[in-house]
Amino acid sequence: MTTEQLHDVRLHVNGSVHEVQVPARRLLSDALRHDCGLTGTHVGCEHGVCGACTILVDGAPVRSCLMLAVSAVDSEITTVEGLTEDDGTPQGRLSPVQQAFSDCHGLQCGFCTPGFLTTITAGLRDNPDPSEEEAREMIAGNLCRCTGYQNIVKSVLRAAEIQGEIQGEIQGEIERERG
Amino acid sequence: MTTKLFGTKVPRVEDQRFLRGQGRYVDDLLHDDPRLLHAAVLRSPHAHARIVDIDVADVLDVDGVLAVWTYDDLTGPMAEPLPLLIPHPALTHGRTQYALAKDEVNYVGEAIAFVVAVDRYVAEDAVARIRVDYEQLKPVVGIAAARAAQRTVHDDVPDNVGARLEQENGDARAAIAAAPHALVLDLDIERSACTPMEGRGTVARWDPDTSRLTVWSSTQTSTGVRGCVAAKLGLDLAKVDVITPDVGGGFGVKVVHPWPEELLVPLAAMTLGRPVKFTEDRREHFISSAHERAQQHHVEVGFDDEGRLLGLDVEFWHDHGAYTPYGLIVPIITSTQLLGPYKPQNYRVVFSSLYTNTVIVTPYRGAGRPQGCFVMERTMDAIAAYLGKDRTEVRSANFIQPDEFPYEHGLVFQDGRELTYDSGDYPASLAKLKELVGWDEFEDFRAEMAAQGRKVGIGLACYVEGTGVGPYEGAHVHIETSGKVKVATGLTTQGQGHQTAFAQIVADTLGVRFEDVEITTGDTRKMPYAVGTFASRAAVMSGSAIHLASLRAKEKALRIAAEALEASEDDLEIVDGVVSVKGTDAKIDLGTVAVLSNPLRYAFDEASKAATQFSVGDPGKPPVDEDDEPGLEGKDFYSPPRSTFASGMHAVIVETDPDTAEITILKYAVVHDCGHLINPMIVEGQIHGGVAQGVGGALYERMAYDESGQLLNASFMDFLMPYVTEVPTSIEIDHLETPSPLNPLGIKGAGEAGVIPSAAVFAAAIEDAEGFPITAMPISPSELYALRLEHADNSFAG
């Protein structure tokens, strides 16, 4: 049996370039986890139902288990590791969505969490001020077996609140500078 | 003064790494080690077959394959059947599988061959090239087929009966015969499963330099895995370390050990001299891990005019799948915890635990209690309906009263100990539940909804849960010279927030800052004596052990500090890691006390200079007293005489669509009593999760085996686990805190509670809405619709 043909692939992930050599069939989820070493993206079902492996591809939530690594070459990818915000520390500051999950106990075992965080990050970009109903809608494609979703819904609403507060502060600063 | 953390909603410390994508689950380990190999398993496609021949010749041609093993490649203890973990005298025909099938397979998914290759893709390619010649046998699928016993799963197990166990308190049959009223019920529960988001996984590395084996496994018992690996691989226990990394949910299934892969992976790592990883995929989890729940019950009950249980006689049939590695734990729990908060005057229970050609049955959150609760609560509702009484009145008439504790049932529980409830207040719980759900106002609501053409129903269900089962857990507390406190307990963590809850206990008991406490769980290098995380036992067992170990460390700290400060121990207090003489300025840091506790010959930093032999101690005495040891540490174990019994009650209001029979949850209320709460935020999270799993189990989830033993819904696409759209939009929760007298913190377990009464409470509410009995769960809209047609036909006929 012949050796599998490998492809040189440049993946743009969280602002960095990863040069990897993968066979055509390698799932993007596996490439991110095992070739790029970004193990924060988790694989829960490998058939696109659970949403644990959700990443942002050019800003849109995508199931990385349903995409091949070779098809991601031209895209800007964001994984859970790329959600934290730069505050000068090596760790970075939790994003509003991450902070909200901590505030509201929106996670237990943490396995599904990266997929929720990326999904909600994109969701709040489209709808920064969701109603409770819309918050449910936003997370309705992701499975969690621990939390019963109660506190994840709260986390969505809390994240919108934190984001709103930050926006307000930025707006205030701009106005002060102008004034 | 340090603020007391016990009982407060302290945010979880583990969240930081999980939220940043820095958790370390088993499949994340060694990913950057180029020597890492990957395993895949050939599994039986047949539910029942003889293996005539296995041909692996094609596999060795696959580039990147390093090993392919079948049963014939196993030797010594590895060639023996897997252990029967929990033997029981009544389990007369216990059987376990081999790590790789020998001659016969008994369920779809049973491991037949094990391949190790350079990556999982290649390993799966190789698995696909293995040729097995099977002689197919007719399978036994489902309880009805197992009871009929027209054919058997194992040739040497007559009638498919693995065990039959009977317990009786009083004379139930005589009491029923003499009772003013009697009823008979037949009740069914179908299979479901834990389905944690992370499946099973194991990584192993053999270090030839130190002759040590390290195994990482996504398990609920690292000490259990360690014992099995050592025994099966013929290694001294001291040569094996088992570490449980972050675990993506367990819910019971991961307490089973050793899985075939948990032995084959370490064996391959030793044989090939390279680290090996196995990570199961979702289909493998469905067909080759474990399920639970399936039981059929026949109930006969005799009662008086008030609905008091004079005699209760229950016979049930439990489907334990193809093998019995976990013994009779699930049916024993069902048979004893069925009693809930009630005190039947006479009780007899007998069960048969049956073989079927389906995957094994082992505890799933609730572990036999949801079935028992369903049976008892359906019986209570049937009595109430028969007598025309309010359902809460019949329950009240049967409650064990608060002044009757400890209450002895005259039965033997799952731990081999007497079934004795330690404490509880069931009447108070019921009063709270009625208030919370609006029980007394419901008829007005029903009328209001009926006026709009809408159909609603209300149900309630009560349970008692034996938690904190023994034999023991231990803890080790080490105060470092930096003042940081490192704590190890041996049981494992799979999302319960132990790093936070246990640190709260340490901070309070020791008088140190919460931030200075670091908890390690599930690492046999740090605490080799442990049992595991199951049966809602972690907080009770390890929480208590950590408290006791912290007290020992504190005792020693006070003794050394008293000497250093020339004060009486009674006058000292420890606040935020500083020991001080109350009411004075005299004080000493715990870190410095740690320095003083360990007389040194060599100084390696500023702190240790203070502890060298020319600096500390009375030159007239040995540096370390005869009855003392160096270091500021505390170690202790907690081993209770018996389980502590938590309790609770749920109520639900549902609406059933008159046309589509869709079932909608309008209100869900929980009253929960797990004694003192360490962290109410975490406990409520456990309840939320349990309720969601309960909703799944009651309305959506089932294992759809066809008559040939194929699992038709072995994917998240087809097995209907609830999304946010299926769970109640809110859950009303109220707590009662009846402390346990059995442990120093007065706590009871909380992990499983949320899921126990679900089948019972939904059956009750749907029955109330529809007006005909609900006797089988789960129930789908199409099944409810079929029942409507059936009862409409009956009423025409009548």
Image (cartoon, coloured by chain):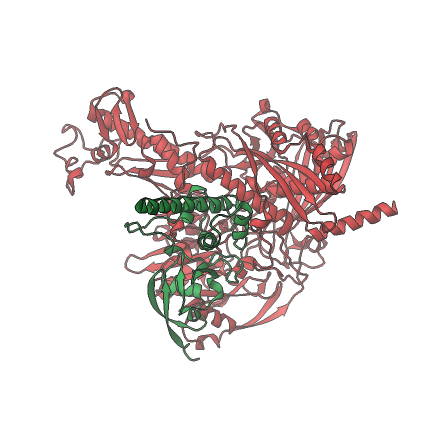
Chain colours: A green, B red
Horizontally, residue B303 falls left or right of residue B617, namely right
One can see residue B567 in this view = yes
Place residue B587 in its image quadrant: top left
Please tell me which residue lies in front, B455 or A108.
B455
Q: Position of residue B791 (x, y in %)?
A: 80, 47
**In the depicted structure, whether residue B711 falls above or below residue A22:** above
Q: Position of residue B490 (x, y in %)?
A: 40, 43
Identify the residue shown where x is 67% and y is 37%: B459
Place residue B75 in its image quadrant: bottom left
One can see residue B329 in this view = no
Please tell me which residue lies in front, B487 or B716.
B716
**In the depicted structure, whether residue A174 falls above or below residue B341:** below
Please tell me which residue lies in front, B452 or B439.
B452
Please tell me which residue lies in front, B573 or A18.
A18
**In the depicted structure, whether residue B519 falls above or below residue B74:** above
The total number of labels drawn is 0
Q: Position of residue A131 (x, y in %)?
A: 53, 46
Horizontally, residue B10 falls left or right of residue B773, namely left
Q: Residue furthest left?
A: B614
Quarter of the figure with the C terminus of chain B: top right
Quarter of the figure with the N terminus of chain B: top left
Horizontally, residue B344 falls left or right of residue B493, namely right
Q: Position of residue B580 (x, y in %)?
A: 25, 25
Q: Residue furthest front?
A: A179
